[in-house]
Each structure stands twice: as C-alpha cells, then as structure tokens.
C-alpha cells in the first residue's frame, strides 16, 4: 500500500515546498532570478563610461552669437577631464598589489588654449541652422611616476620629472537666426 501512494506523496510534498515562504504572483524568471556577482573592475568600467558620457561627450547647443560681443569658448578642460584622458592613454589603475603597482604623485596640470574659432553657419540634422565653435587646448601634466615591482626582486623605480602632453578639443554649437520668431507660416 505505501508504494501506490508514493507518487501522490511526492506531488503533495513538492506542492508544499513550492508554497512555503513568499509567494510570487507574477511570472518567474527561473534561473535568471539568481543574482550574479559583477567584478569590481567591470563595474568601474561601466561607471567611468557613464561619467564620461554624462560630463564630457555631449555637445551643448547655445543661443545665437550677438554682433559686437567677444566670442569666447566655454570653460577650459577640468582637471578631472585631463586626468581621465591621461588614464585612457597611460593607465595607472589595475596593478597587482605587492607584485606590480604604479602611482602618479605630485601632479601639476598646465592648460594652454591653442586655438578658438567658429565655423560658418550650416544646417545640422535635428538641430537646424547653427555654427560650430571649436576650442583646442594643450594640457601638460607634470608628475612623479613611481613603479613598485615586487617580483622577482622587490624594487622601486622613481621618475621625478615625468610629463605627458594631452590635446583636448571642446566643441559646442551656437544657433543661427531669430529663435523668438518661431514658425512664420502659422
């Protein structure tokens, strides 16, 4: 008799186990509902990518230029922008502690404007008539480069007069025409 009821007992036990705890009202994701850990390196890459997109990869659209006013570009590159550009060229992050590490100490940044000019008006898709304003900067980064190597013989390499030159371009658009007029046909 116990053998005839074994499948029924298994079905009832599975039903009881499935109904214990919190119940899910919507569809189940199955194995996809289990959280998967993300390495810190990959998370930092995504955060840096978002930060660069949010801060430095967008082109602002400003109002039209007024006649007789001085035409000056927006702000020069920030120290954060210069250091992020340097990190893309010559990375410091990602060393292995006690095996190989690299540091930049005593950082000093000198920014020079190379050129500042405006293109003639043209029509940009989704924007309309506008002028592109270009500003080119030469940024020289002076720093002390320290490399600590831990294998096979632990030693430290120190370059007290390291420097890198980075060129950064800032572009933005100025609208052309009377923006207050709106559509003349209506």
Image (cartoon, helix red, strand yellow):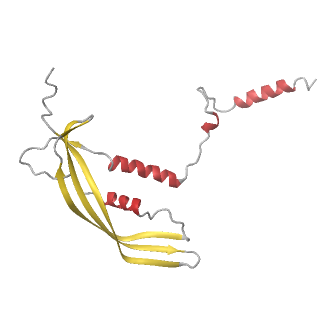
- Identity of the residue drawn at 44% across and 65% down: 92
Residue 140 sits above or below residue 2 on the image: below
19 is higher (above) or lower (below) than 114: above
The answer to which of 171 and 53 lies nearer the viewer is 171
Measured from the top left, where is residue 49 in percent x and y?
42, 50
Q: Is residue 22 left or right of residue 71?
A: right
Q: How many marks?
A: 0
**Residue at far left of view:** 68
Above or below, 115 against 128 in this view is below
Q: Quadrant of residue 115?
A: bottom left
Residue 75 visible from this viewpoint:
no
Q: Residue at x 50, y 62 (%)?
A: 94
- Which image quarter is the N terminus in? top right
x and y percentages locating residue 44 in the rendered image: 47, 53
Could you say which quadrant of the image residue 9 lies in?
top right
Residue drawn where x is 44% and y is 50% of the image: 47
Q: Residue furthest right?
A: 1
């Amino acid at each position: 008799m116990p053998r005839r009821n074994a499948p029924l007992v298994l079905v009832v036990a599975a039903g009881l186990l499935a109904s214990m705890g919190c119940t899910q009202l919507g569809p189940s994701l199955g194995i996809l509902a289990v959280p998967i850990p993300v390495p810190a390196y990959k998370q930092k890459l995504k955060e840096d990518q978002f930060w660069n997109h949010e801060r430095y990869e967008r082109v602002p659209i400003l109002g039209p230029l007024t006649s007789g006013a001085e035409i000056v570009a927006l702000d020069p590159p920030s120290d954060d922008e210069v250091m992020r550009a340097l990190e893309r060229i010559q990375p410091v992050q990602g060393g292995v502690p006690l095996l190989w590490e690299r540091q930049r100490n005593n950082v000093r940044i000198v920014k020079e404007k190379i050129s500042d000019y405006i293109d003639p008006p043209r029509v940009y898709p989704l924007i309309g008539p506008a002028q592109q304003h270009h500003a080119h900067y030469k940024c020289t980064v002076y720093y002390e480069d320290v490399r600590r190597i831990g294998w096979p013989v632990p030693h430290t390499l120190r370059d007290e007069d390291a420097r890198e030159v980075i060129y950064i371009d800032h572009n933005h658009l100025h609208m052309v025409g009377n923006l207050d007029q709106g559509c003349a046909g209506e």
